[in-house]
Amino acid sequence: MILLTCPNCGERNVAEFRFGGEYKARPKNPEGSAADAAWAEYLHFKNNKLGVQQEWWYHRAGCGLWFLAERHTKTHGVEKTYLWAPDPGTKKPGLDQPTLTDVQP
Ligand SMILES: [Zn+2]
């Protein structure tokens, strides 16, 4: 059984959750013809990474919270889960630094 830790509810069976896809930063208001390409890349192209990737998860049978998890795509081991937060220095989405809401499984 795969367990996933909801930042709000704690450790639960993964069957309670819905996978929301890999995390990608949204395009920053691209202009002109670059807008279509940027949005197409954001919406339709995935990295399909082998290794630890950041992913969206939704606690559908629990609190209804969307959160991020760092999961190894081969072993399915979840390294940590946490709430999304903007990078405080640049006011843009950034997940390179841990936040105060990090939860270890
Ligand atoms: Zn929850």
Image (spheres, helix red, strand yellow):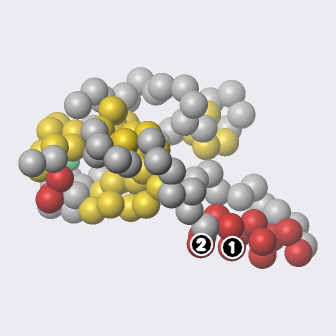
Label 2: how many Cα within 10 Å (few below 14, some 14–19, many 20+): few
Callout 1–callout 2 Cβ contact below 8 Å: yes
Q: Which residue is mark 2?
A: 44
Where, by quadrant of the figure, is residue 6 drawn? top left
| Relative vertical location of residue 17 with respect to residue 95 in this rendering, above or below | below
Mark 1: which secondary structure? helix
| Relative vertical location of residue 92 with respect to residue 59 in this rendering, above or below | above
Q: Is residue 9 found left or right of 98 in the rendered image?
A: left
Residue shown at 22%/39% (left/top)? 5
Residue shown at 17%/53% (left/top)? 14
Residue shown at 85%/69% (left/top)? 34
Which numbered circle lies on residue 68?
Answer: none
Check the image and name the residue furthest to the right. 32
The C terminus: image quadrant: top left
Mark 2: which secondary structure? helix
Q: Is residue 40 found left or right of 86 in the rendered image?
A: right
Q: Position of residue 77 (x, y in %)?
A: 28, 39
Q: Is residue 18 found left or right of 83 in the rendered image?
A: left
Q: Which residue is mark 1?
A: 40
Where, by quadrant of the figure, is residue 18 drawn? bottom left
**Amino acid type, mark 1:** Ala
Label 2, ligand 1: CB separation under 8 Å: no
**Amino acid type, mark 2:** His
Q: Position of residue 23 (x, y in %)?
A: 51, 52
- Residue closer to the observer: 59 or 55: 55
